[in-house]
Amino acid sequence: MLPPQTNAHRLALSLDGLWDLALAGAQGVSGDFVTDRVAPVPSALEELYCEAWWLDAERDVCYRRFFELPAIPTDRRWSLWFGGVSYRAEVWIDGVKVGEHETGHTPFEVPLPASCRPGRRIEVRVRVTQTLSADTVPMGNLMNTGANGQFAGQYPDVPFDFFPFTGIHRSVHLVAVAEQAQLAKLDFEPTLRTANIGHIALAGRVRGNAHAVECRVAELGWACSAGVEDGAFHLGGEVGTVEAWDIGQPRLYDVEVRLIDAAGVVVDSYQRHLGFRSIEVVGTQLKLNGRAVRLTGFGKHEDFAVVGRGGGGAVTVRDFALMAWTGANSFRTSHYPYAEETLDLADRLGVLVIAEAPAVSINFEFTTERTLETHLRCVEELIARDRHHPSVIMWSVANESLSTHAKARPYFRQVTARARELDGTRPLIGVTCHGASDTTLDLYDLVGVNLYPGWYELPGLLAQAEDRLEEILRGLHEVFHGPIMITETGADAVAGFHSLPARQWSEEYQAELIERLFRRARALPFMMGEHVWNFADFATAQNFPRALGNRKGVFTRDRQPKLAAHRLRSWWHEADETAPTDPTAKLFTPTL
Ligand code: BDP
Protein backbone atom coordinates (compact mmCIF):
# COMPACT_ATOMS: atom_id res chain seq x y z
CA MET A 1 0.00 0.00 0.00
CA LEU A 2 1.47 3.31 -1.08
CA PRO A 3 0.38 6.72 0.23
CA PRO A 4 -1.88 8.74 -2.10
CA GLN A 5 -0.11 10.54 -4.92
CA THR A 6 -1.29 12.37 -8.02
CA ASN A 7 0.87 11.91 -11.10
CA ALA A 8 0.43 10.87 -14.73
CA HIS A 9 -0.88 7.45 -13.64
CA ARG A 10 -2.47 8.05 -10.26
CA LEU A 11 -5.13 10.36 -8.89
CA ALA A 12 -5.69 11.24 -5.22
CA LEU A 13 -8.71 13.30 -4.17
CA SER A 14 -9.12 14.55 -0.62
CA LEU A 15 -12.24 13.62 1.36
CA ASP A 16 -11.21 15.85 4.26
CA GLY A 17 -13.76 18.32 5.56
CA LEU A 18 -16.98 18.06 7.54
CA TRP A 19 -18.46 14.59 7.93
CA ASP A 20 -21.77 13.80 9.66
CA LEU A 21 -21.44 12.28 13.12
CA ALA A 22 -23.70 10.09 15.26
CA LEU A 23 -23.54 7.70 18.16
CA ALA A 24 -23.41 4.22 16.65
CA GLY A 25 -25.94 1.50 17.37
CA ALA A 26 -24.84 -1.75 19.04
CA GLN A 27 -23.27 -2.90 15.80
CA GLY A 28 -23.00 -1.89 12.16
CA VAL A 29 -23.21 1.74 11.14
CA SER A 30 -26.78 2.72 11.89
CA GLY A 31 -26.91 5.95 13.80
CA ASP A 32 -29.15 8.92 14.41
CA PHE A 33 -27.47 11.55 12.26
CA VAL A 34 -28.77 14.84 13.57
CA THR A 35 -27.78 17.93 11.67
CA ASP A 36 -25.96 19.70 14.50
CA ARG A 37 -23.35 17.02 15.00
CA VAL A 38 -20.49 17.18 12.55
CA ALA A 39 -16.96 15.88 12.76
CA PRO A 40 -14.15 17.67 10.98
CA VAL A 41 -11.68 15.31 9.29
CA PRO A 42 -8.86 15.23 10.28
CA SER A 43 -9.51 15.82 13.98
CA ALA A 44 -10.16 14.04 17.24
CA LEU A 45 -13.64 14.44 18.71
CA GLU A 46 -13.07 15.02 22.40
CA GLU A 47 -12.36 18.75 22.44
CA LEU A 48 -14.92 19.90 19.87
CA TYR A 49 -18.16 20.02 21.82
CA CYS A 50 -19.08 21.38 25.23
CA GLU A 51 -20.32 18.13 26.64
CA ALA A 52 -18.69 14.71 26.44
CA TRP A 53 -21.77 12.98 25.05
CA TRP A 54 -19.98 10.06 23.40
CA LEU A 55 -17.20 9.72 25.92
CA ASP A 56 -19.39 9.48 28.99
CA ALA A 57 -21.64 7.01 27.24
CA GLU A 58 -18.51 5.06 26.19
CA ARG A 59 -20.15 4.41 22.87
CA ASP A 60 -18.79 3.96 19.41
CA VAL A 61 -19.36 6.73 16.92
CA CYS A 62 -20.28 6.66 13.29
CA TYR A 63 -18.98 9.03 10.61
CA ARG A 64 -20.81 9.56 7.31
CA ARG A 65 -20.32 11.44 4.07
CA PHE A 66 -21.36 11.26 0.42
CA PHE A 67 -19.22 11.59 -2.66
CA GLU A 68 -19.19 10.96 -6.40
CA LEU A 69 -16.37 9.59 -8.47
CA PRO A 70 -15.12 11.79 -11.30
CA ALA A 71 -15.62 10.52 -14.85
CA ILE A 72 -12.02 9.67 -15.64
CA PRO A 73 -11.13 6.63 -17.84
CA THR A 74 -13.12 3.65 -16.59
CA ASP A 75 -10.22 1.21 -16.37
CA ARG A 76 -9.38 2.58 -12.93
CA ARG A 77 -9.30 0.78 -9.62
CA TRP A 78 -10.67 3.03 -6.87
CA SER A 79 -9.99 2.78 -3.17
CA LEU A 80 -10.40 4.77 -0.01
CA TRP A 81 -7.21 5.53 1.88
CA PHE A 82 -7.27 6.46 5.58
CA GLY A 83 -4.12 7.95 7.12
CA GLY A 84 -5.16 6.92 10.64
CA VAL A 85 -8.35 6.23 12.58
CA SER A 86 -8.20 5.75 16.31
CA TYR A 87 -8.60 3.09 17.55
CA ARG A 88 -10.56 0.70 15.32
CA ALA A 89 -12.43 1.45 12.10
CA GLU A 90 -15.07 -0.40 10.10
CA VAL A 91 -15.70 1.03 6.64
CA TRP A 92 -19.09 0.58 4.96
CA ILE A 93 -19.99 1.61 1.42
CA ASP A 94 -23.69 1.96 0.54
CA GLY A 95 -24.67 -0.23 3.49
CA VAL A 96 -22.10 -2.98 2.92
CA LYS A 97 -19.02 -3.51 5.07
CA VAL A 98 -15.92 -3.33 2.86
CA GLY A 99 -13.02 -3.23 5.28
CA GLU A 100 -11.69 -2.67 8.77
CA HIS A 101 -8.51 -1.73 10.56
CA GLU A 102 -7.27 -1.88 14.11
CA THR A 103 -4.69 0.40 15.82
CA GLY A 104 -4.89 4.09 15.43
CA HIS A 105 -1.79 5.53 13.81
CA THR A 106 -0.93 3.74 10.59
CA PRO A 107 -2.71 3.99 7.23
CA PHE A 108 -5.02 1.47 5.61
CA GLU A 109 -6.72 1.19 2.26
CA VAL A 110 -10.13 -0.22 1.35
CA PRO A 111 -10.98 -1.02 -2.30
CA LEU A 112 -14.31 0.34 -3.50
CA PRO A 113 -16.78 -2.25 -4.81
CA ALA A 114 -17.35 -2.41 -8.58
CA SER A 115 -20.81 -0.87 -8.10
CA CYS A 116 -19.12 2.47 -7.34
CA ARG A 117 -19.06 4.17 -10.73
CA PRO A 118 -18.91 7.83 -11.79
CA GLY A 119 -22.28 9.59 -11.81
CA ARG A 120 -23.68 7.82 -8.73
CA ARG A 121 -23.97 9.27 -5.24
CA ILE A 122 -21.95 6.98 -2.96
CA GLU A 123 -22.28 6.86 0.82
CA VAL A 124 -19.34 6.00 3.08
CA ARG A 125 -19.83 5.34 6.78
CA VAL A 126 -17.08 4.59 9.27
CA ARG A 127 -17.72 3.08 12.67
CA VAL A 128 -15.01 4.20 15.08
CA THR A 129 -14.34 2.38 18.35
CA GLN A 130 -12.05 3.71 21.03
CA THR A 131 -12.64 1.00 23.63
CA LEU A 132 -9.25 -0.37 24.61
CA SER A 133 -8.74 -3.72 26.34
CA ALA A 134 -6.07 -6.23 27.38
CA ASP A 135 -5.90 -7.32 23.73
CA THR A 136 -5.37 -3.92 22.17
CA VAL A 137 -2.17 -1.94 21.57
CA PRO A 138 -2.02 0.24 23.55
CA MET A 139 -3.85 -1.63 26.29
CA GLY A 140 -6.70 -0.10 28.28
CA ASN A 141 -9.55 -0.84 30.69
CA LEU A 142 -7.28 -2.88 32.95
CA MET A 143 -9.48 -2.18 35.98
CA ASN A 144 -7.57 1.00 36.63
CA THR A 145 -4.46 -0.79 37.78
CA GLY A 146 -2.01 1.23 35.71
CA ALA A 147 1.33 -0.27 34.77
CA ASN A 148 4.61 0.24 36.59
CA GLY A 149 2.46 1.49 39.48
CA GLN A 150 1.70 4.71 37.58
CA PHE A 151 -1.45 6.14 36.05
CA ALA A 152 -3.79 4.01 38.14
CA GLY A 153 -7.31 5.11 38.98
CA GLN A 154 -7.85 7.56 36.17
CA TYR A 155 -10.65 8.32 33.73
CA PRO A 156 -10.73 7.04 31.04
CA ASP A 157 -9.13 3.86 32.38
CA VAL A 158 -5.84 3.76 30.49
CA PRO A 159 -2.48 2.64 31.92
CA PHE A 160 -0.63 5.48 30.18
CA ASP A 161 -0.33 9.22 30.46
CA PHE A 162 -1.86 10.76 27.36
CA PHE A 163 -5.44 11.15 26.23
CA PRO A 164 -6.80 8.29 24.11
CA PHE A 165 -8.28 10.56 21.45
CA THR A 166 -11.02 9.17 19.20
CA GLY A 167 -11.61 9.84 15.54
CA ILE A 168 -10.52 10.01 11.95
CA HIS A 169 -7.48 12.02 12.92
CA ARG A 170 -5.54 11.84 9.67
CA SER A 171 -6.58 12.67 6.11
CA VAL A 172 -8.85 10.51 3.95
CA HIS A 173 -8.33 10.19 0.20
CA LEU A 174 -10.02 8.62 -2.76
CA VAL A 175 -7.31 7.00 -4.82
CA ALA A 176 -7.43 5.84 -8.44
CA VAL A 177 -4.81 3.63 -10.08
CA ALA A 178 -4.77 1.62 -13.32
CA GLU A 179 -7.06 -1.43 -13.12
CA GLN A 180 -4.64 -3.58 -15.13
CA ALA A 181 -1.63 -3.33 -12.77
CA GLN A 182 -0.32 -1.21 -9.93
CA LEU A 183 2.76 -0.79 -7.76
CA ALA A 184 1.57 -2.03 -4.37
CA LYS A 185 4.66 -1.95 -2.14
CA LEU A 186 8.08 -0.30 -2.43
CA ASP A 187 10.69 -1.08 0.21
CA PHE A 188 13.69 1.13 -0.44
CA GLU A 189 17.00 0.60 1.27
CA PRO A 190 19.34 3.46 0.34
CA THR A 191 22.75 3.13 1.99
CA LEU A 192 26.00 4.96 2.04
CA ARG A 193 29.00 2.75 1.41
CA THR A 194 32.57 3.84 1.87
CA ALA A 195 32.48 7.59 2.38
CA ASN A 196 30.28 8.89 -0.42
CA ILE A 197 29.24 6.00 -2.63
CA GLY A 198 25.48 5.50 -2.59
CA HIS A 199 23.65 2.23 -3.07
CA ILE A 200 19.95 1.52 -3.56
CA ALA A 201 18.19 -1.77 -2.96
CA LEU A 202 14.50 -1.89 -3.81
CA ALA A 203 12.12 -4.78 -3.13
CA GLY A 204 8.51 -4.38 -4.16
CA ARG A 205 5.20 -5.96 -4.97
CA VAL A 206 2.88 -5.45 -7.89
CA ARG A 207 -0.84 -6.11 -8.17
CA GLY A 208 -2.16 -7.24 -11.56
CA ASN A 209 -0.32 -8.03 -14.79
CA ALA A 210 2.96 -6.25 -15.32
CA HIS A 211 6.16 -7.15 -17.02
CA ALA A 212 8.97 -5.06 -15.56
CA VAL A 213 9.88 -2.30 -13.14
CA GLU A 214 12.28 0.53 -13.72
CA CYS A 215 13.81 2.76 -11.05
CA ARG A 216 15.66 5.98 -11.77
CA VAL A 217 17.34 8.84 -9.96
CA ALA A 218 17.54 11.43 -12.73
CA GLU A 219 19.89 13.74 -10.86
CA LEU A 220 22.48 10.97 -10.59
CA GLY A 221 21.90 9.71 -14.11
CA TRP A 222 21.20 6.30 -12.56
CA ALA A 223 18.57 3.78 -13.68
CA CYS A 224 17.99 0.12 -13.05
CA SER A 225 15.28 -2.33 -14.09
CA ALA A 226 14.07 -5.82 -13.22
CA GLY A 227 11.37 -8.24 -14.29
CA VAL A 228 8.24 -8.90 -12.21
CA GLU A 229 7.85 -12.50 -11.07
CA ASP A 230 4.84 -13.74 -9.12
CA GLY A 231 3.96 -10.15 -8.35
CA ALA A 232 7.37 -9.36 -6.79
CA PHE A 233 10.57 -7.69 -7.93
CA HIS A 234 14.04 -6.85 -6.59
CA LEU A 235 16.49 -4.43 -8.08
CA GLY A 236 19.35 -2.19 -7.10
CA GLY A 237 23.00 -1.36 -7.31
CA GLU A 238 25.57 1.32 -6.80
CA VAL A 239 24.36 4.78 -7.79
CA GLY A 240 27.75 6.52 -7.78
CA THR A 241 28.97 9.47 -5.76
CA VAL A 242 26.32 11.10 -3.58
CA GLU A 243 26.12 13.76 -0.90
CA ALA A 244 25.19 12.27 2.46
CA TRP A 245 21.97 13.12 4.29
CA ASP A 246 22.94 14.53 7.70
CA ILE A 247 21.74 16.59 10.66
CA GLY A 248 20.89 20.05 9.35
CA GLN A 249 22.28 19.06 5.94
CA PRO A 250 19.34 17.16 4.55
CA ARG A 251 20.44 16.19 1.06
CA LEU A 252 17.55 14.39 -0.62
CA TYR A 253 17.30 12.79 -4.05
CA ASP A 254 14.10 12.25 -6.03
CA VAL A 255 13.56 8.72 -7.20
CA GLU A 256 10.91 7.46 -9.63
CA VAL A 257 9.65 3.90 -10.05
CA ARG A 258 7.77 2.91 -13.21
CA LEU A 259 5.73 -0.19 -13.88
CA ILE A 260 5.83 -1.42 -17.47
CA ASP A 261 3.50 -3.85 -19.28
CA ALA A 262 4.42 -6.49 -21.89
CA ALA A 263 4.00 -3.95 -24.71
CA GLY A 264 6.52 -1.61 -23.07
CA VAL A 265 3.87 0.89 -21.96
CA VAL A 266 4.23 2.56 -18.55
CA VAL A 267 1.05 1.71 -16.58
CA ASP A 268 1.93 3.10 -13.14
CA SER A 269 4.59 5.26 -11.52
CA TYR A 270 5.47 6.50 -8.06
CA GLN A 271 7.84 9.18 -6.79
CA ARG A 272 9.64 9.35 -3.49
CA HIS A 273 12.60 11.16 -2.00
CA LEU A 274 15.55 9.23 -0.58
CA GLY A 275 18.55 10.18 1.52
CA PHE A 276 21.84 8.33 1.71
CA ARG A 277 23.30 7.95 5.18
CA SER A 278 24.70 5.29 7.44
CA ILE A 279 23.77 4.64 11.05
CA GLU A 280 25.48 2.20 13.38
CA VAL A 281 26.22 1.49 17.01
CA VAL A 282 29.89 1.21 17.87
CA GLY A 283 30.71 0.58 21.52
CA THR A 284 28.85 3.24 23.50
CA GLN A 285 28.51 5.52 20.50
CA LEU A 286 25.87 6.05 17.85
CA LYS A 287 27.52 6.86 14.55
CA LEU A 288 25.83 8.76 11.76
CA ASN A 289 27.84 8.71 8.53
CA GLY A 290 30.77 7.39 10.51
CA ARG A 291 30.72 10.28 13.03
CA ALA A 292 29.66 9.90 16.68
CA VAL A 293 26.48 11.91 17.34
CA ARG A 294 24.83 13.06 20.52
CA LEU A 295 21.04 13.27 20.41
CA THR A 296 19.49 16.43 21.85
CA GLY A 297 15.77 16.99 21.76
CA PHE A 298 12.42 15.85 22.98
CA GLY A 299 9.86 13.21 23.61
CA LYS A 300 6.72 14.65 22.02
CA HIS A 301 3.03 14.02 21.51
CA GLU A 302 0.71 14.65 18.62
CA ASP A 303 -1.49 16.89 20.69
CA PHE A 304 -2.99 20.31 20.24
CA ALA A 305 -5.97 22.19 21.64
CA VAL A 306 -9.35 21.52 19.96
CA VAL A 307 -8.05 19.14 17.26
CA GLY A 308 -6.45 16.67 19.68
CA ARG A 309 -4.24 14.45 17.56
CA GLY A 310 -5.42 15.89 14.24
CA GLY A 311 -3.21 18.99 14.20
CA GLY A 312 -1.64 18.36 10.83
CA GLY A 313 0.46 20.80 8.85
CA ALA A 314 0.43 24.07 10.78
CA VAL A 315 1.19 22.55 14.18
CA THR A 316 3.87 20.33 12.66
CA VAL A 317 5.63 23.27 11.01
CA ARG A 318 5.45 25.26 14.25
CA ASP A 319 6.91 22.37 16.23
CA PHE A 320 9.87 22.01 13.90
CA ALA A 321 10.48 25.77 14.05
CA LEU A 322 10.52 25.60 17.85
CA MET A 323 12.76 22.55 17.93
CA ALA A 324 15.22 24.39 15.67
CA TRP A 325 15.01 27.44 17.94
CA THR A 326 16.05 25.36 20.95
CA GLY A 327 18.91 23.77 18.97
CA ALA A 328 17.48 20.24 19.24
CA ASN A 329 18.62 17.75 16.61
CA SER A 330 16.13 14.93 17.25
CA PHE A 331 12.85 13.73 18.74
CA ARG A 332 11.02 10.52 19.55
CA THR A 333 7.53 9.84 18.19
CA SER A 334 6.40 8.95 21.70
CA HIS A 335 4.20 6.92 22.09
CA TYR A 336 2.91 5.96 18.63
CA PRO A 337 3.70 6.53 14.94
CA TYR A 338 3.20 10.17 13.93
CA ALA A 339 1.60 11.45 10.73
CA GLU A 340 3.83 10.73 7.76
CA GLU A 341 4.11 14.42 6.88
CA THR A 342 6.02 14.87 10.17
CA LEU A 343 8.64 12.43 8.92
CA ASP A 344 8.67 14.11 5.50
CA LEU A 345 9.47 17.37 7.23
CA ALA A 346 12.16 15.74 9.39
CA ASP A 347 13.71 14.41 6.16
CA ARG A 348 13.62 17.86 4.59
CA LEU A 349 15.06 19.65 7.61
CA GLY A 350 17.67 17.12 8.66
CA VAL A 351 16.20 16.18 12.04
CA LEU A 352 16.77 12.70 13.53
CA VAL A 353 13.76 10.62 14.57
CA ILE A 354 13.32 7.69 16.92
CA ALA A 355 10.14 6.11 15.52
CA GLU A 356 8.04 4.35 18.15
CA ALA A 357 5.34 1.68 17.90
CA PRO A 358 2.07 2.43 19.76
CA ALA A 359 2.87 -0.06 22.53
CA VAL A 360 3.00 1.89 25.77
CA SER A 361 2.86 0.49 29.31
CA ILE A 362 2.44 -3.14 28.23
CA ASN A 363 1.31 -4.80 31.45
CA PHE A 364 2.17 -8.51 31.50
CA GLU A 365 -0.33 -9.20 34.28
CA PHE A 366 -3.00 -8.81 31.57
CA THR A 367 -1.46 -9.58 28.15
CA THR A 368 -3.04 -12.26 25.98
CA GLU A 369 -1.82 -13.98 22.83
CA ARG A 370 -3.75 -11.42 20.88
CA THR A 371 -1.84 -8.55 22.51
CA LEU A 372 1.37 -9.95 21.05
CA GLU A 373 -0.23 -10.52 17.62
CA THR A 374 -1.50 -6.95 17.53
CA HIS A 375 1.87 -5.63 18.72
CA LEU A 376 3.70 -7.53 15.96
CA ARG A 377 1.30 -6.10 13.39
CA CYS A 378 1.92 -2.59 14.74
CA VAL A 379 5.68 -3.06 14.30
CA GLU A 380 5.16 -4.38 10.76
CA GLU A 381 2.92 -1.46 9.79
CA LEU A 382 5.29 1.08 11.34
CA ILE A 383 8.35 -0.26 9.54
CA ALA A 384 6.49 -0.69 6.25
CA ARG A 385 5.35 2.92 6.34
CA ASP A 386 8.48 4.65 7.63
CA ARG A 387 11.46 2.65 6.44
CA HIS A 388 12.27 4.89 3.48
CA HIS A 389 12.70 8.02 5.63
CA PRO A 390 16.37 8.94 6.15
CA SER A 391 15.37 10.87 9.29
CA VAL A 392 14.28 7.66 11.01
CA ILE A 393 17.49 6.38 12.55
CA MET A 394 16.17 3.77 14.96
CA TRP A 395 13.03 1.90 16.02
CA SER A 396 11.54 1.83 19.49
CA VAL A 397 9.15 -1.12 19.71
CA ALA A 398 7.58 0.02 23.00
CA ASN A 399 7.71 2.57 25.81
CA GLU A 400 7.98 1.59 29.47
CA SER A 401 6.69 -1.95 29.49
CA LEU A 402 6.43 -3.89 32.71
CA SER A 403 9.74 -5.43 31.71
CA THR A 404 10.67 -6.76 35.13
CA HIS A 405 7.90 -9.37 34.71
CA ALA A 406 8.77 -12.98 33.84
CA LYS A 407 6.70 -12.80 30.64
CA ALA A 408 8.50 -9.71 29.34
CA ARG A 409 11.60 -11.36 27.91
CA PRO A 410 9.95 -14.06 25.75
CA TYR A 411 7.42 -11.50 24.55
CA PHE A 412 10.02 -8.92 23.55
CA ARG A 413 12.30 -11.54 22.07
CA GLN A 414 9.59 -12.07 19.46
CA VAL A 415 8.86 -8.39 18.94
CA THR A 416 12.53 -7.41 18.50
CA ALA A 417 13.20 -10.42 16.25
CA ARG A 418 10.36 -9.34 13.97
CA ALA A 419 11.66 -5.77 13.80
CA ARG A 420 15.17 -6.97 12.94
CA GLU A 421 13.87 -9.37 10.31
CA LEU A 422 11.96 -6.54 8.63
CA ASP A 423 14.74 -3.97 8.81
CA GLY A 424 18.32 -4.99 9.42
CA THR A 425 19.65 -1.49 8.74
CA ARG A 426 18.48 0.37 11.84
CA PRO A 427 19.35 -0.20 15.49
CA LEU A 428 16.64 -0.92 18.08
CA ILE A 429 16.32 1.15 21.23
CA GLY A 430 14.67 -0.25 24.37
CA VAL A 431 12.91 2.49 26.34
CA THR A 432 12.70 1.59 30.01
CA CYS A 433 11.87 3.06 33.40
CA HIS A 434 13.35 0.06 35.23
CA GLY A 435 17.05 0.81 34.91
CA ALA A 436 19.32 -2.18 35.55
CA SER A 437 16.43 -4.42 36.68
CA ASP A 438 14.85 -4.45 33.20
CA THR A 439 15.08 -8.07 32.00
CA THR A 440 15.01 -7.23 28.28
CA LEU A 441 18.00 -4.89 27.92
CA ASP A 442 20.21 -7.26 25.95
CA LEU A 443 17.59 -7.49 23.19
CA TYR A 444 18.43 -3.93 22.14
CA ASP A 445 21.34 -2.06 20.56
CA LEU A 446 20.75 1.07 22.61
CA VAL A 447 18.85 1.80 25.80
CA GLY A 448 16.73 4.86 26.48
CA VAL A 449 16.05 5.51 30.13
CA ASN A 450 13.04 7.37 31.49
CA LEU A 451 13.73 8.68 34.97
CA TYR A 452 12.31 11.39 37.19
CA PRO A 453 14.62 12.16 40.13
CA GLY A 454 13.62 15.53 41.55
CA TRP A 455 10.03 14.97 40.52
CA TYR A 456 8.37 11.65 41.38
CA GLU A 457 11.21 10.78 43.72
CA LEU A 458 13.26 13.25 45.76
CA PRO A 459 10.79 16.10 45.10
CA GLY A 460 12.35 19.50 45.62
CA LEU A 461 15.83 18.06 46.20
CA LEU A 462 17.78 19.26 43.21
CA ALA A 463 21.29 18.28 44.32
CA GLN A 464 20.22 14.82 45.50
CA ALA A 465 18.32 14.34 42.25
CA GLU A 466 21.56 14.75 40.30
CA ASP A 467 23.28 12.13 42.43
CA ARG A 468 20.38 9.74 42.03
CA LEU A 469 20.46 10.20 38.25
CA GLU A 470 24.15 9.34 38.14
CA GLU A 471 23.59 6.32 40.36
CA ILE A 472 20.83 4.97 38.07
CA LEU A 473 22.84 5.60 34.90
CA ARG A 474 26.01 4.00 36.27
CA GLY A 475 23.99 1.00 37.47
CA LEU A 476 22.54 0.62 34.00
CA HIS A 477 25.94 0.90 32.35
CA GLU A 478 27.22 -1.96 34.51
CA VAL A 479 24.70 -4.32 32.94
CA PHE A 480 24.28 -2.75 29.49
CA HIS A 481 27.45 -1.84 27.63
CA GLY A 482 26.00 -0.17 24.53
CA PRO A 483 25.01 3.49 24.12
CA ILE A 484 22.58 4.88 26.69
CA MET A 485 20.50 8.02 26.39
CA ILE A 486 17.96 9.78 28.55
CA THR A 487 14.70 9.39 26.66
CA GLU A 488 12.66 11.11 29.37
CA THR A 489 13.25 13.36 32.31
CA GLY A 490 11.66 16.57 33.43
CA ALA A 491 9.24 18.27 35.78
CA ASP A 492 5.74 19.72 35.51
CA ALA A 493 5.62 23.51 35.44
CA VAL A 494 2.55 25.67 35.06
CA ALA A 495 3.43 28.58 32.75
CA GLY A 496 3.38 31.73 34.84
CA PHE A 497 4.15 29.99 38.17
CA HIS A 498 7.39 31.43 39.54
CA SER A 499 9.35 30.67 42.64
CA LEU A 500 12.75 31.58 44.11
CA PRO A 501 14.12 29.45 45.54
CA ALA A 502 13.02 27.06 42.82
CA ARG A 503 10.11 24.86 43.95
CA GLN A 504 8.05 22.18 42.21
CA TRP A 505 5.54 23.34 39.55
CA SER A 506 7.41 26.63 38.98
CA GLU A 507 9.17 27.49 35.73
CA GLU A 508 12.40 28.00 37.69
CA TYR A 509 12.30 24.48 39.15
CA GLN A 510 11.66 22.83 35.79
CA ALA A 511 14.48 24.79 34.11
CA GLU A 512 16.99 24.17 36.87
CA LEU A 513 16.21 20.47 37.26
CA ILE A 514 16.53 19.73 33.54
CA GLU A 515 19.78 21.63 33.21
CA ARG A 516 21.37 20.01 36.27
CA LEU A 517 20.37 16.49 35.17
CA PHE A 518 21.57 16.99 31.61
CA ARG A 519 24.91 18.46 32.66
CA ARG A 520 25.49 15.57 35.06
CA ALA A 521 24.50 12.95 32.45
CA ARG A 522 26.71 14.46 29.79
CA ALA A 523 29.74 14.07 32.02
CA LEU A 524 29.32 10.28 31.83
CA PRO A 525 31.27 8.92 28.85
CA PHE A 526 28.76 6.21 27.95
CA MET A 527 25.82 8.64 27.56
CA MET A 528 24.98 9.51 23.96
CA GLY A 529 21.92 11.70 24.22
CA GLU A 530 19.33 13.61 26.16
CA HIS A 531 15.65 14.09 25.42
CA VAL A 532 13.42 16.20 27.64
CA TRP A 533 9.99 15.00 28.61
CA ASN A 534 8.09 16.77 27.07
CA PHE A 535 8.25 19.19 24.18
CA ALA A 536 4.85 20.74 25.00
CA ASP A 537 2.09 20.37 27.59
CA PHE A 538 -0.43 17.74 26.53
CA ALA A 539 -3.84 16.30 27.37
CA THR A 540 -4.08 13.22 29.58
CA ALA A 541 -6.79 11.14 31.19
CA GLN A 542 -8.21 12.80 34.31
CA ASN A 543 -6.24 12.04 37.44
CA PHE A 544 -5.39 14.14 40.48
CA PRO A 545 -1.68 14.80 39.70
CA ARG A 546 -2.69 16.19 36.31
CA ALA A 547 -3.88 19.77 35.95
CA LEU A 548 -5.82 19.82 32.65
CA GLY A 549 -3.14 17.47 31.39
CA ASN A 550 0.57 16.92 31.82
CA ARG A 551 2.55 20.15 32.29
CA LYS A 552 6.02 18.78 31.64
CA GLY A 553 6.18 20.65 28.34
CA VAL A 554 8.96 23.19 28.01
CA PHE A 555 6.46 24.84 25.67
CA THR A 556 2.84 25.41 26.60
CA ARG A 557 0.14 23.53 24.75
CA ASP A 558 -0.23 26.56 22.44
CA ARG A 559 3.51 26.45 21.75
CA GLN A 560 4.96 29.37 23.73
CA PRO A 561 8.21 28.93 25.67
CA LYS A 562 8.55 28.42 29.39
CA LEU A 563 11.82 29.33 31.11
CA ALA A 564 13.17 25.80 30.52
CA ALA A 565 12.90 26.24 26.75
CA HIS A 566 15.12 29.34 26.94
CA ARG A 567 17.56 27.44 29.15
CA LEU A 568 17.73 24.52 26.71
CA ARG A 569 18.32 26.94 23.87
CA SER A 570 21.47 28.21 25.60
CA TRP A 571 22.60 24.73 26.61
CA TRP A 572 22.11 23.14 23.20
CA HIS A 573 23.72 26.05 21.38
CA GLU A 574 26.91 25.61 23.38
CA ALA A 575 29.51 23.91 21.18
CA ASP A 576 28.44 20.40 20.30
CA GLU A 577 31.49 18.52 19.18
CA THR A 578 29.33 15.98 17.35
CA ALA A 579 27.33 18.38 15.15
CA PRO A 580 28.35 18.71 11.49
CA THR A 581 27.69 22.47 11.56
CA ASP A 582 25.55 24.87 13.55
CA PRO A 583 22.21 23.04 13.39
CA THR A 584 20.06 26.17 13.64
CA ALA A 585 21.75 27.79 10.66
CA LYS A 586 20.58 24.94 8.48
CA LEU A 587 16.98 24.48 9.50
CA PHE A 588 14.37 26.00 7.24
CA THR A 589 16.69 26.07 4.27
CA PRO A 590 15.37 27.22 0.88
CA THR A 591 14.53 23.61 -0.03
CA LEU A 592 11.44 23.88 2.18
C1 BDP B 1 6.73 8.42 31.85
C2 BDP B 1 5.90 8.05 30.64
C3 BDP B 1 5.25 9.27 29.97
C4 BDP B 1 4.62 10.14 31.04
C5 BDP B 1 5.70 10.59 32.02
C6 BDP B 1 5.16 11.53 33.12
O1 BDP B 1 6.68 7.38 29.67
O2 BDP B 1 4.29 8.84 29.03
O3 BDP B 1 3.91 11.23 30.52
O4 BDP B 1 6.20 9.44 32.64
O5 BDP B 1 4.77 11.02 34.17
O6 BDP B 1 6.84 7.38 32.73
O7 BDP B 1 5.09 12.73 32.90
Image (cartoon, rainbow, N blue to C red):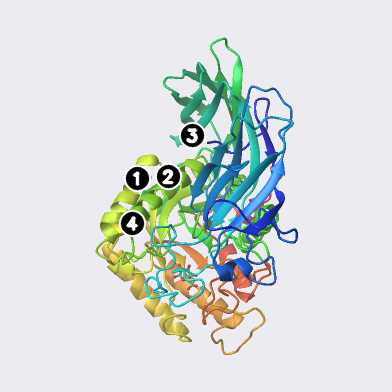
Mark earlier in primary sequence (1, 2): 2
Q: CA distance from mark 4 to mark 1?
A: 21 Å
**Amino acid bearing label 3:** Phe
Q: Is residue 207 visible?
A: yes
Residue 188: which disc? Answer: 3
Mark 2 lies on a secondary structure that is: helix
The residue at 43%/68% (across/down) is 141
The mark lying in front, picked from 4 and 2, is: 2
Q: Would you place residue 383 above or below residue 186 in this image?
A: below
**Amino acid bearing label 1:** Arg
The mark lying in front, picked from 4 and 1, is: 1
Q: Nearer the viewer, residue 257 or 146?
A: 146
Mark earlier in primary sequence (3, 1): 3
> Does ligand 1 reach within 8 Å of label 2's beta carbon?
no
Mark earlier in primary sequence (4, 1): 1
**Which residue does the numbered mark 4 point to in the structure image?**
482
**Amino acid bearing label 2:** Glu
**Which residue does the numbered mark 1 point to in the structure image?**
418
In the image, 280: left or right of 264? left
Q: Position of residue 463 (x, y in %)?
A: 44, 83
Q: Position of residue 228 (x, y in %)?
A: 46, 19
Q: CA distance from mark 3 to mark 2?
A: 15 Å
Q: CA distance from mark 1 to mark 2?
A: 8 Å
Q: For the residue carrying disc 4, how many other residues have a C-alpha within 10 Å: few (<14), some (14-19), or many (20+)? A: many
